Image: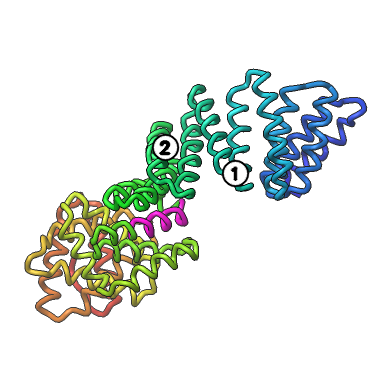
Amino acid sequence: MDPAREALVARLARFPVERYPVQHAITLFHLGSLDADAGDAATALEALTAARRLFADIPMRLEEAKATVMLGAAQRAAGALDEARESFTVASGALAELDQPVERAAAVYNLGLVLAELGDGPAARAAWASAGELFGDAGRLAQAAAAAREQGASLLTSGDPAAALPLLARASELAEHAGDAAGLGAAANVLGLAHLAADDPAAAVAAFRRAVGAFPRSTRPAEYAMAKANLALAYERVGDLPRARLTAGQALGVSGAAAAVLDQAGLLVARHGGRRDQDLLAVLDDEGRDAWVTLLREEMVRLVELRDEDRRAGMGAFLAGVLRPEAAAYDLAHALWEVVLEQPEAPYRRLVAAVAEAWAELPEPEADRLHAILRSALARFPMPQWQRLAASLAAAATTAGKPAQW
C-alpha cells in the first residue's frame, strides 16, 4: 500500500466516526482525493460520498461543497457524466452562496468539461466563460488562461476559427504572464491550429514556434513532438519545404511522441522528397547566424538518439556542408562546438565520436581542410573548454583509426 494512503487508513481507525465525526470526515476527504489522483475512481467515489454526507450532517458547508467538487471529478473519471454534472452544479451554487469565488470557478470550469463531454458545446463554453471571469477577477491568470483555451478550442472544433482566435490569443498571453509554460504551449498550439483553419499559415508558424519553445524536449517530449509536427504542417502550407521536412523529421525523432503525431509527421515527409542534410543546410543558410545554435541544438539532440552509423552519417552530411565554398565554415564549426559542449556527458561523447568518425572517412584534402576549420573554431573557446574538446577529439580520432593532434 502507498505510505500516504496507509497513513490515512490508519487515521480513520484512530478516529471512529461515532466519536470523532469531523476528523473522520476530513480523513475520508483526503483519502478520496488521494485515490482520485491515483486513478482509482471506484474507491474515491466511496470515500468522497461518505465524506460529503458527514460534512452535511455535522454541518460543515464549505467542506461539503469542496467534497462535492472532488466527488464530481471522481464521477467524471468513472464515466458517470450525468452525476458529475449534478455534483459540479450543486457545488458551484453552494460556493457562490459561501462567497468562495476561486473554488466556485474551479467547479464551473469542471462543469464545462463535463458538458463538453456530454456534447453540449454552447453550455460548456458559457461555463468556461464564467469560470474565466471568476479566475481573472481573483488574479488566477493560469486558470483563467485554461478556461479561455478550452472555450477557444471548443469554438474551433465547432467550426468557428474566427471566434476562437481572440480567445486563444488571450489564453496564450494570460499563460505567459502567469509564468505557466505548459499552459502557454497548450494555448499557442491550439492557436496555431486555429490560424491554419482560418487560412493564415504564416500566423500559424509563429504560434507553433511559440508552442515548441514552451515545451522542452527533455521534460515534455510528447508535447514537443506534437508542436513540432504541427509546425511542420504550417511550414508546408507557406511553401517552405526544407523547414517542413526538417521540422517533421525532428518530430519523428522523439521517442515519446504519440502515434498520431508520428503518423502526421511521417506523411508530410512522404509527401515531399528531398534529403535531410540538404534541408538542414538550406535552413542554416537562410537563417541569421544568431539562430544557428538553436537550429543545430535541435538536430544534434536528434542525432544523439540515433544508431551509431546513422549518427555518423548525419554528422558527416553537416560537416560536408561546412566545407562548401560558400559556407561560413568557421562560424558553423563554432556553433557546432557550442552545442556539443552544452550536452551532458554521454551525449557529448557520442557527438564528439561522430565528428571524429565522419572526419576520418574523408579523403585527405577535405579531411585536412576540415581539421583546420574545426581546430580554429576550438580556439574561440575558453581554455578549459578548448582542452576538454581537444582531448576528447584526439581520443575519438584514435579510436576511429586516424590519430591526430587537436
Label 2 sits on residue: 167
- Residue 184 lies, in percent from the top left, at 41, 41
Labels 1 & 2 near each other (Cβ < 8 A): no
Task: Report the magenta residues as a range.
Answer: 220-232
Amino acid on which the number 1 mark rests in the picture = Asp
The colour scheme used to paint the residues is rainbow
Asked if residue 92 is positioned above or below residue 258 in the image, the reply reads: above
Q: Is residue 155 left or right of residue 196?
A: right
Residue lying farthest left?
A: 325
Residue 362 quadrant: bottom left
Res 378 visible = no
Residue 389 quadrant: bottom left
Label 1 sits on residue: 120
Residue shown at the point (58%, 35%) measured from the top left: 109
Residue shown at the point (40%, 46%) measured from the top left: 161
**Distance from the alpha carbon under mark 1 to that under mark 2:** 19 Å
Secondary structure under the numbered disc 2 in the rendered image: helix
Q: Is residue 288 left or right of residue 356?
A: left
- Residue 159 lies, in percent from the top left, at 45, 49
- Residue 373 lies, in percent from the top left, at 12, 64
- Residue 189 lies, in percent from the top left, at 40, 49
The residue lying toward the viewer, choosing from 387 and 168, is 168
Foreground tag (1 vs 2): 1
